Image (cartoon, rainbow, N blue to C red):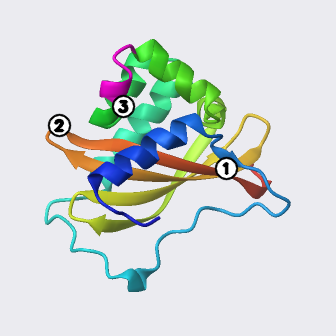
Amino acid sequence: MIRFGRAAGVVAGLALLTWPAIAQSEAPSAPSMPDASSAPMPAQADAQPADWQSVIDHQVQAFRDHDAEGALAEAAKPFHDMFPDPAAFFSAIMTGGYQPIMDSQSDTFGEYQMVAPDTVLQRVSFVGKDQTLYDAIYEMGHEDAGWRVEAVQMTKAAGTGV
């Protein structure tokens, strides 16, 4: 994922809501993390994985609990601007192909990469209720209120979860 600036990230994040989230192909592949040779910017001195991972955890649990307000609380400001009603946000997520997050039995954090001082990409793997595997790349942005979910790219992964 290439970062073109905050406006492009917002457009990409909002576009992800309107397009199907799960890539279907003959040979599904996981979203790829950016190449380390792309010279990412130095990380914030105080940024720790637990800081943004707890935000992802809270949002995933809110989706599992069908807590629209809690799920929107962890989203970046542009989502609040676009969806002043948490129920509309929740509905857009459900119909936008992100149902596997809501239906997931478990999730596991994978690698992450700081791509700018205020942006991190975090891989999260999900096991669905039918043991289907999904990989997601969360784009996390640091706002005044802390880390927030800016975008999620999901793919169906090969294999079966246990």
**Cα–Cα span, label 1 and label 3:** 23 Å
Q: Position of residue 58 (x, y in %)?
A: 39, 33
Relative to residue 160, is residue 41 drawn left or right?
Answer: left
Magenta residues (range): 79-85
**Can you identify the residue that label 1 sits on?**
134
Residue tagged 2: 145
Residue 26 in sight from this viewpoint: yes
Q: As rendered, which of 11 and 129 lies closer to the eye?
A: 11
Number of residue marks: 3
* Residue at (32% x, 66% y) in the render: 114
Disc 2 is placed on an element classified as loop
> Residue at position x 42%, y 33% from top?
59
First in residue order: circle 2 vs circle 1: 1
Within 10 Å of disc 1 (Cα), the crowding (few <14, some 14-19, many 20+) is many
How far apart, in angstroms, are the residues tagged by discs 2 and 1? Answer: 29 Å
The residue singled out by tag 3 in the image is 79
